[in-house]
Structures are given as structure tokens and as C-alpha cells.
Image (tube, rainbow, N blue to C red):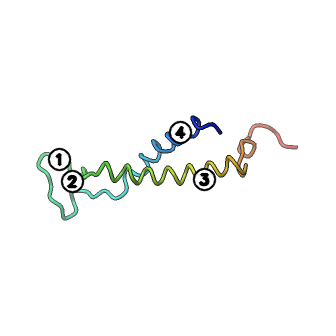
Amino acid sequence: MRFSSIIAIYALFWSLSFFFVLPFRLKTSEEPDVHVRGQAESAPPRFSFVRTCKWTTFVAAVLFGIYYLNYVNGWFGPEVVDFFTPHR
């Protein structure tokens, strides 16, 4: 696998992992924090973009590692999910 492919696939894993990580560790304003005037009730009072990016990088690295091990070892290939070709 070329290095440019590795970077592109990791970027895909990172962007998808960001949306996976985003809802975790959020606190709503119903919890005993200070409610900011003018903010929606469901909005979190504090959001740490840096912390979310760190968790996203970790999750994306783990998922990419599993993907790369599968790519090298060939555990799960496209022939496994081919439901349209009849098997004999």
C-alpha cells in the first residue's frame, strides 16, 4: 500500500471517527453545571474540541490498525461480502 493511500484512508477513518466520538463525554445543562443564558437546554455548557480531537485520533488509529492488519493478512476480503455472484 502506498503512503498516499495510507494517509487518505486514515483521513477517512479520522473524519468518521470524529462523528462517532462527538457525543461521548458531553454534559447537558441539566447536570449541576451553570446554565448559560440564551443557550438551548440540550446544549453542553463546555465543549473541548482539543479533547475530542485527541480521542478521535486514538479511535481512528485503532480502527486503521485493524484495517491495515486485515489488508496485509487478507482475513476479510471483497469475496466475503459478494452476495450477488452464485457460489458453486
Amino acid type of the residue that numbered disc 3 sits on in the rendered structure? Ile
Tell me whether circle 2 and circle 1 mark residues in contact (CB < 8 Å). Answer: yes
Location of mark 4 (residue) = 7
- The amino acid marked with disc number 1 is Gln
Query: Which-is-in-front pick, marks 3 and 1?
Result: 3
The residue sitting at the front extreme is 3
Q: Earlier in the sequence, mark 3 or mark 1?
A: 1
Q: Position of residue 85 (x, y in %)?
A: 79, 37
Kindly state the secondary structure of the residue where label 3 is placed.
helix
Three-letter code, disc 4: Ile
Using the numbered discs, state the Cα–Cα distance from disc 2 to disc 1 in whole angstroms. 8 Å
| Residue holding disc 3 | 66
Residue identifier under label 2:
45
Give, as a three-letter code, the residue at label 2.
Pro
Which residue is found at the position 27% from the left and 51% from the top? Answer: 47
- The residues bearing labels 2 and 3 have C-alpha atoms spaced at a distance of 35 Å
- Residue at left offset 60%, top offset 53%: 66
Please name the residue that numbered disc 1 is placed on.
39
Closer to the chain start, of discs 4 and 2, is: 4
C-alpha gap between disc 4 and disc 3: 15 Å
* Labels 4 and 3: the sequence-earlier one: 4
Dot placed on the residue nearer the N-terminal end, 2 or 3: 2
Would residue 69 be found to the left or right of residue 29 on screen? right
Q: Position of residue 60 (x, y in %)?
A: 49, 49
